[in-house]
Image (spheres, rainbow, N blue to C red):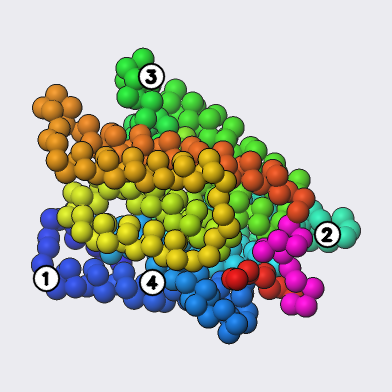
């Protein structure tokens, strides 16, 4: 469907039946893949929701109706729900202790959309740590070989039609990894686009593409190192989700050729941790939607954007959350106030002729600051809780094999 609709869009063909098919195909793909994975995850972490029906329903709504995903897939029109749904199935299998099923599901997600590569370091470290903690050397070797064989077979099945014609495979790889493009094309809320606000740091016009590739590779690898090292050293279920969040943010902030919609990748593990602090997750989700506002505004999605922003903040406020420290409360209030101020400025003030993108740049830079802070806080929290998974809301209760307890009081 993505290929067919992309071809239709490239031809500039549009009609009412085509729109209906596009919208319907996204809804069907969500119903078949994303929503079942969200429901399965909630049943896993809270197998007996009867005692806390409202809180359980609120947590399910938070996970299954992510405003940034709804705006991108059903407004801007994408099929991100498929790749995120497959990634969610992979995370669920990993948390259940089913590494082979996890490998198959994540291989499918990665082959459906290469942006799922943002989550791959966390999967690699979690599955590797689990394999290396087997009782004997023979079992460790067997586990590693089983994982390797599963991944190779999964990729082989997907790529078999392309491998028949080497040129087709090479063309696909070139499309997947667009190294001939520049470091960024649109105004995206990452570090490189934000640094370009300062003329001495406008790297896009200072360095060659090959130099920028090496720079982004080194910076991204450096940012991936702390969460991956923590997960390898102290593997845990909560650590796995925190590592997935930090790694995907590291890719978004520092890697080469980032798109606005790639913020959906860190949003997924954040949503799986949302029950720990619903209000905090609503803040991050609002920042994710905010970072895409220039893209959404071009598609005429201002009204849905405002409605969903208000809804997610209201839902986060309505669900019980631990109290934030005073500094964090002030930071959240200042953040929301600043976002509203930028929206008012964008609506009331026309950009100067010399700087037509000033509003888009302001939105991306403001959101970038939030994402850098989120990365630092996530790695810090993973470090502080690296030894303390037992007894937390993502610990395995002795009475329930494979289930993760979910505090909904």
Q: Which residue is painted at 62% across and 42% down in the image?
A: 379
Query: What distance separates the C-alpha of mark 2 from that of mark 1?
Result: 57 Å
Quick check: marks 3 and 1 in contact, CB under 8 Å?
Answer: no
- Residue interval drawn in magenta: 389-400
| 3 lies left or right of 190 | left
Q: Is residue 247 visible?
A: no
Disc assigned to residue 271: none
Q: Nearer the viewer, mark 3 or mark 2?
A: 3
> Element under label 1?
helix
Q: Which comes before the other along the chain, label 2 or label 1?
A: 1
Along the polypeptide, which appears first: circle 4 or circle 2? 4
Q: Looking at the rendered structure, which numbered label has been put on residue 134?
A: 2
Q: Secondary structure at mark 2?
A: loop
Badge 3 crowding class, 10 Å Cα cut-off, few under 14, some 14 to 19, many 20 or more, is some
Q: Residue at x 29, y 34 (%)?
A: 362
Residue name at image x 12 percent, y 35 percent: 350
Residue position marked by numbered label 3 in the rendering: 201
Give the alpha-carbon distance from disc 3 to disc 1, as whole Å.
Answer: 46 Å
Residue 30 - label: 4
């Amino acid at each position: 469907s993505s290929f067919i609709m992309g071809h239709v869009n490239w031809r500039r063909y549009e009609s009412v039946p085509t729109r209906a098919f596009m919208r319907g195909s996204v809804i069907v793909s969500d119903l078949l893949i994303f929503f079942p994975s969200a429901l399965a995850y909630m049943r896993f972490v809270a197998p007996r929701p009867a005692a806390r029906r409202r809180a359980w329903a609120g947590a399910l709504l938070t996970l299954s109706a992510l405003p940034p995903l709804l705006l991108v897939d059903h407004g801007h029109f994408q099929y991100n729900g498929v790749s995120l749904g497959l990634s969610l199935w992979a995370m669920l299998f990993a948390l259940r202790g089913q590494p082979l099923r996890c490998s198959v599901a994540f291989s499918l997600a990665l082959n459906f959309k290469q942006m799922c590569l943002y989550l791959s370091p966390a999967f690699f470290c979690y599955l590797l740590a689990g394999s290396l903690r087997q009782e004997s050397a023979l079992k460790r070797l067997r586990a590693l070989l089983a994982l390797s064989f599963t991944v190779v077979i999964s990729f082989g099945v997907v790529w078999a039609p392309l491998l028949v014609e080497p040129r087709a495979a090479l063309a696909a790889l070139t499309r997947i990894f667009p190294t001939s493009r520049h470091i960024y094309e649109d105004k995206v809320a990452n570090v490189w686009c934000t640094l370009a606000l300062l003329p001495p740091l406008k790297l896009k016009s200072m360095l060659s593409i090959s130099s920028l590739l090496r720079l982004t590779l080194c910076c991204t690898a450096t940012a991936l190192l702390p969460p991956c090292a923590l997960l390898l050293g102290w593997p845990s279920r909560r650590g796995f989700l925190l590592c997935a969040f930090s790694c995907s943010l590291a890719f978004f902030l520092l890697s080469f050729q980032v798109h606005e919609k790639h913020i959906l990748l860190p949003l997924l593990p954040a949503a799986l941790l949302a029950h720990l602090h619903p209000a905090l997750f609503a803040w991050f989700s609002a920042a994710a939607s905010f970072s895409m506002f220039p893209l959404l505004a071009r598609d005429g999605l201002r009204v849905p954007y405002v409605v969903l922003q208000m809804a997610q903040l209201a839902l986060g406020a309505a669900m019980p959350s631990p109290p934030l420290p005073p500094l964090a409360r002030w930071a959240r209030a200042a953040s929301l106030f600043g976002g509203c101020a930028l929206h008012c400025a964008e609506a009331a003030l026309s950009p100067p002729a010399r700087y037509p993108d000033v509003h888009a740049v302001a939105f991306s830079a403001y959101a970038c600051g939030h994402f850098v802070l989120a990365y630092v806080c996530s790695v810090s929290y993973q470090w502080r809780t690296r030894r303390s998974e037992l007894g937390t809301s993502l610990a395995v209760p002795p009475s329930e094999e494979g289930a993760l307890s979910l505090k909904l009081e």
